[in-house]
C-alpha cells in the first residue's frame, strides 16, 4: 500500500468535509487526491457505515483525550478514586 493511500484513509477518518465529499463521489474524490486506479476501485467498495462509525468513535476519543489534558492530573486521580473535594 502506498503512503499516499494510507494518508488519504487516515484523513477520511478525521476530516469531516473530506469524508462528506468522498461519500458523495468516492471515485471522483479519490482521483482528485491523486490515487491510482486500483486504489480508487478499492475505495469505491469501502464499508460506508463502518467508515462513519469509526470516524465518530475516533472523534469521541480525541475529544476525551483533549478534555483529560485540560484537567490537572490530581483532579483526574481524585475523580477516578471517587474522592470528594475538600
Image (cartoon, helix red, strand yellow):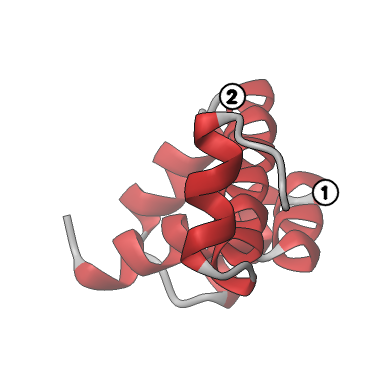
Residue at screen point 57% across, 34% down: 54
- Of the two numbered discs 2 and 1 in the rendering, the one whose residue sits closer to the viewer: 2
Residue at screen point 62% across, 51% down: 64
Between 6 and 73, the one lying in front of the other is 73
Note whether residue 2 is visible: yes
Q: In this view, does 56 lie to the left or right of 75?
A: right
Marks 2 and 1, how far apart at CA: 16 Å
Q: Is residue 22 left or right of residue 6?
A: right
- Residue 49 spot, x, y in % from top left: 68, 22
Work out whether 49 lies above or below 65: above
Residue at screen point 59% across, 57% down: 75
- Residue 15 spot, x, y in % from top left: 67, 65
Q: Quadrant of residue 14?
A: bottom right
Note whether residue 12 is visible: no
Mark 2 closeness class: few <14, some 14–19, many ≥20 residues within 10 Å: few
Work out whether 81 lies above or below 61: above
Between 34 and 7, the one lying in front of the other is 7
The disc placed on residue 50 is 2
Where's the N terminus, which quadrant? Answer: bottom left
Q: In this view, does 8 lie to the left or right of 57?
A: left
- Residue 62 spot, x, y in % from top left: 58, 57
Work out whether 44 lies above or below 82: below
Work out whether 37 lies above or below 4: above
Residue underneath mark 1: 24
Mark 1 closeness class: few <14, some 14–19, many ≥20 residues within 10 Å: few
Q: In which quarter of the image is residue 35?
A: bottom left
Q: Disc 2 vs disc 1: Cβ atoms closer than 8 Å?
A: no
- Judged from the image, the secondary structure of the residue bearing numbered disc 1 is helix
- Residue 57 spot, x, y in % from top left: 61, 36
Amino acid at each position: 500500500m502506498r503512503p499516499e493511500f494510507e494518508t488519504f484513509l487516515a484523513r477520511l477518518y478525521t476530516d469531516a468535509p473530506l469524508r462528506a465529499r468522498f461519500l458523495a463521489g468516492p471515485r471522483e474524490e479519490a482521483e482528485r487526491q491523486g490515487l491510482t486506479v486500483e486504489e480508487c476501485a478499492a475505495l469505491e467498495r469501502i464499508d460506508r457505515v463502518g467508515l462513519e462509525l469509526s470516524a465518530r468513535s475516533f472523534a469521541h476519543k480525541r475529544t476525551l483525550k483533549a478534555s483529560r489534558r485540560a484537567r490537572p492530573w490530581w483532579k483526574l486521580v481524585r475523580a477516578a478514586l471517587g474522592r470528594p473535594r475538600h
